Amino acid sequence: MAWTQNVLRVNLSSGETAKEALNMTWADSYLGQRGLASKYLAEEIDPAVDALSPDNKLIMVTGPLTGTMASTGGRYSVVTKSPLTGAIACSNSGGFIGAEIKMAGWDMIIFEGRADTPVYLYLENEKAELLPADDLWGKSVWEADERLHQKHQDPLIRIACVGRAAEQGNLYAGIINDLHRAAGRSGVGTVMASKNLKALVCRGTRGVGNLKDPLRFLQAVEQGKRVLAENAVTGQGLPQYGTQVLMNVINEMGALPTRNMQEVQFEGTHNISGEAMHEPRSSDGQPNLTTNAACFGCTIACGRIATLDKGHFTVENKPGYWGASGGLEYEAAWALGSDTCIDDLDALTYANFLCNEDGFDPISFGSTLAAAMELYEMGVITEQDTDGIELKFGSAQALTRTAELTARGEGFGKVLGLGSKRLCEKYGHPELSMTVKAQEFPAYDPRGIQGMGLAYATSNRGACHLRGYTVASEVLGIPEKTDPLVSEGKAELVKAFQDATAAVDSSGLCVFTTFAWTLDDIAPQIDAACEGDWSTEKLLEVGERIWNLERDFNLKAGLTGKDDTLPKRLRKDAAKSGPAKGMVSELDKMLPRYYEIRGWTPQGELTAATRQRLGL
Amino acid sequence: MLRALNLEAQKCTGCLQCELACSYENEGVFNPARSRIKVFNFHDEGRFAPYTCTQCEQAWCLHACPVEAIVLNTATGAKEVIEDICVGCKVCTIACPFGTVNYNQASGKVIKCDLCGGDPWCAKACPTGAISYVDLDNTGLDRMRAWAQQSPAGPASYNTPRSPTTPADFTRQNG
């Protein structure tokens, strides 16, 4: 029935591991992955708990379609309370570790407590062992991965690991799996490291089967694959250019945040776009992009594998960075490049390598660096604060040197590792932090794409493009075109995207499929695999329930409707160029309507009727 | 007409759809650990390659088997393991120069590609055409056609050949 119905509970304080039966009543109400683990977390921890205390829990969770042949069915999520935002965190990753956990026979792993000394979990089917990781502590993800492969003498193990950034308390540290896929946002890696847990090493040989209606499932999967292949975005744009297909498009529509969101268009875009990654370099004649690559089961294959010019100033005499590895996705290219005004493609790629090597979120890092650059330009911070680094917008050296320091949590990198909000507060300019709920913005300016302003402000994990990607509608016309410069009707659009995405994030599938798929394409796959009746309507209901559960967690954690806001810059300072010139985010017009259709009070709290309707 | 699996590594994205399809067809579960075809990731080179049994004419595995558990399917050309006869001695796994016959702990027998009786699931599942099932005598046809397309158009251009292209460039462009 797609779920293995097995939960592994790992008590790091006592060193005990135990197998439990999955709560199938909750599975019917929350599906899996994001939804189901959020339910477990909300039931098991006090939302007001200190995120870095042993009382917080960290859940690695798969969806019912994880490990099946459904296209993109390899996703897993990490759910915990975020140390960056104080809100619920759910970070989703592809690669191969999610499917491996499922192949080993587990729907989720709940880590609780804190180990006395560094450990890692070795999971081989039924066998779950906590093993010492003293020799891995202080090592990067890449080095730990290599050592673990050597130690276990098994090339087929899959590894999820935290790097030095997490160990050093970087608040936006992620968990890297398969060397360059990441549960990247909200500091889930920081929580993992706070538990003295270095890695999950997994090998599963049991497989995923026992589907409700295998023949119907295979037919639904086949049909779904066909839709993805025939769609221009998932069939052509993403495999060829990755998410970087968006860089030029978003710049042209004046929604590419630049210079710490002071501007909305970047003059260097053509040097760092998806198209630029294909162009042979003048230096060595090779393109930045080596190949595209797929995550487990994915027939889109948007992943970028890039190779640096060996003569580039960042890697001269550093052969460890000469091989191919995870290249720039749109968000990373934007944060490391556009927001900091840096158009040196290989420098951005090198910084991205460092983000993977030591596990920290390139969005939060780039955005925090952009804020620091603005502070530097204003003269608020000087080279005395920055370890002598000239922190100018546009400086590739500034980017790569600060990335090196942030990776290791050293010097000014330690400050940058606390995120934009804490950085700007430390230096007396909180208004320069481009964050919601202390999480940094992604790559869509809400002045030029109005729906995204509301999506950011109300996102349950702080600013995030993946909680309600109205860009699909406002820019790409999926499922239907809406005007990006108009705020009217966006409350409904944001809610619809948020609810649908919560369901997709709970299935084991990748949200990128929704460039081509609607829930009508997804529901038949879930329904054929899982017990119960999984219609589009039910998925939307589950999605809405998940959204409200997360909201409820956040309110109990101490957040309020006042946190559903955007920085003054986006609400008061008009866009300076492009189609949105003269516009600000009209959040104030959208938010009341949004609360109303959510069934929340004017203060943004769940009403009793809403709770009852959703069974909360 | 016999057919063969034609593997074109430059088209492979490493998605494992082939492994999922193979394991499901043969074992009834999605389980790459039990797949007869394997995709390898040469990470530092940014390269993926699928690999499986080529169905050798003079099959080492077949000749090595002491109990004649590996037999030729004349309809497909596949060398198939007869599970009821296989005693799990693993001599075939030693004999195969390519490593494509492997022991399966769960069954105590060996497993290898049997071309799914002439309808290989891996080829059907592959989203990029990296695995196709083509005329056994013409596995090079697509590559020949691509090269032919590069050749001079006729007498007028006979003396002005196009600039030389290395095989690596070629496969990258067409991959």
Image (spheres, coloured by chain):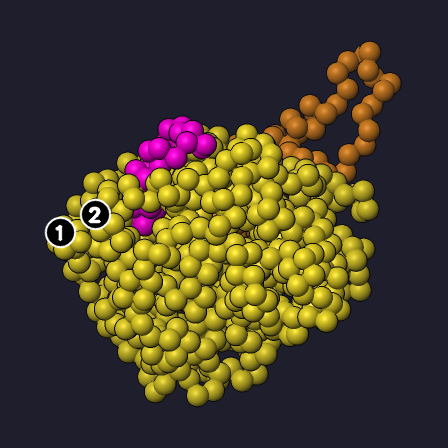
Q: Position of residue A53 (x, y in %)?
A: 39, 79
**Position of B154 compared to A273: left or right?**
right
Which residue is at 42% across, 56% downward? Answer: A462
Marks 1 and 2 close (CB-CB < 8 Å): yes
* Residues beneath discs 1 and 2 located on the same chain: yes
Residue type at the position of mark 2? Gly
Which residue is at 81% across, 32% downward? Answer: B164
Front-lying residue, A9 or A553: A553
Q: Position of residue A9 (x, y in %)?
A: 30, 75
Which chain gets the orange colouring? B
Q: The residue marked by circle 1 belongs to what chain?
A: A
Q: Earlier in the sequence, mark 1 or mark 2?
A: 2
> Bounds of the magenta span?
A478-503
Which residue is at 17% across, 51% downward? Answer: A610
Q: Is residue A440 visible?
A: yes
The correct choice, above or below, for A9 with respect to A290 in the image is: below
**Position of B67 compared to A293: left or right?**
left
Q: Which residue is mark 2?
A: A599
Q: Position of residue A283 (x, y in %)?
A: 82, 46
Residue type at the position of mark 1? Ala
Q: Which residue is mark 1?
A: A609
